[in-house]
Amino acid sequence: MIEAKALEAAAAPPVITAKLRGMVRSTPIRTLLALIVTAVCAYLLLKALVWGANRLGVMTWVHYDYPVTRTVYLNHSPYLTSISSEYTLSWQLLALLSLVLASFVGRCVWYGDFRAAFTRRARWLMVGWILGLSLLIAEMELALRGDIPLATRITGWKMDVFVVAWMLSGSYFCGFWSWLMRRLGVPKEDVFTSDMR
């Protein structure tokens, strides 16, 4: 009796049909699935990182007892805004870190292979993203808060100069990181980026 049931189960058609296998391999469905997984992982990682940082005493959110007036410069004009709470720079860096780590997970889902997220090229690119975006976030925070020594108040043409300098700093960092990757022999393509399956 048991052998007959085992033979029937072995003869049954597979649960995953060729049509379903083709759907999972199609690029739009893989992309959508990878985006959903990346967004969920980024949210959960951010919550976990903020919780861990708060447990270690790092402030990620500042709540003021009374509204604080801040000057924000937009389109060459100063605007006064009053805020009662705000995220800190450490929260922004944790958000960046959670996005980069979640992109590893999304890469695994998109390629359908765990090794795809951990190739040498992928690791170098992710570290470059973390360092480069951290640099740009820090520059923007310093500029908007007026903490840059040479330009304590960025308005008018100074804002244009700052935006150009900000973009150039990102471009120079990308050039430096590309040079460093070439110098250390990081391949331009790997098994996963050379074929799009």
Image: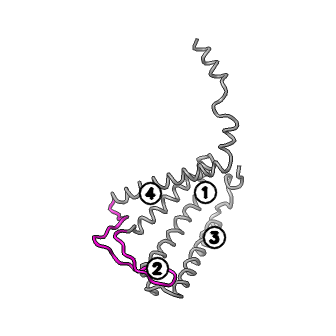
Q: State yes or no: residue 175 in magenta.
A: no
Please name whichever residue, 187 or 147, is drawn nearer the observer in this view of the structure: 147
Which of pointers 2 and 3 lies earlier in the amino acid sequence? Answer: 2
Decide which of 164, 63 is in the foreground and name it: 63
Q: Amino acid type of disc 1?
A: Arg
Q: Earlier in the sequence, mark 2 or mark 4?
A: 4
Disc 2/disc 1 C-alpha distance (Å): 35 Å
Name the amino acid, label 3.
Trp
Question: Where 40 sits versus 80, above or below?
Answer: above
| Earlier residue among tags 4 and 1 | 4
In the structure shown, which secondary structural element does the residue marked by tag 2 occupy?
helix
Category of crowding for the residue at label 4, using alpha-carbon neighbours closer than 10 angstroms: few (below 14), some (14–19), many (at least 20): many
The amino acid type, in three-letter code, at marker 2 is Ala
Residue 89 position, x and y percent, is 42, 69
Query: First in sequence: mark 3 or mark 1?
Result: 1
Q: Which residue is mark 1?
A: 120
Q: Which element carries disc 4, helix, strand or loop?
A: helix
Residue at point 34%, 59% (across, down): 54
Marks 2, 3: nearer the viewer = 2
> Mark 3 sits on what residue?
179
Give the residue at mark 4: 46
Q: Which residues are magenta?
A: 56-85
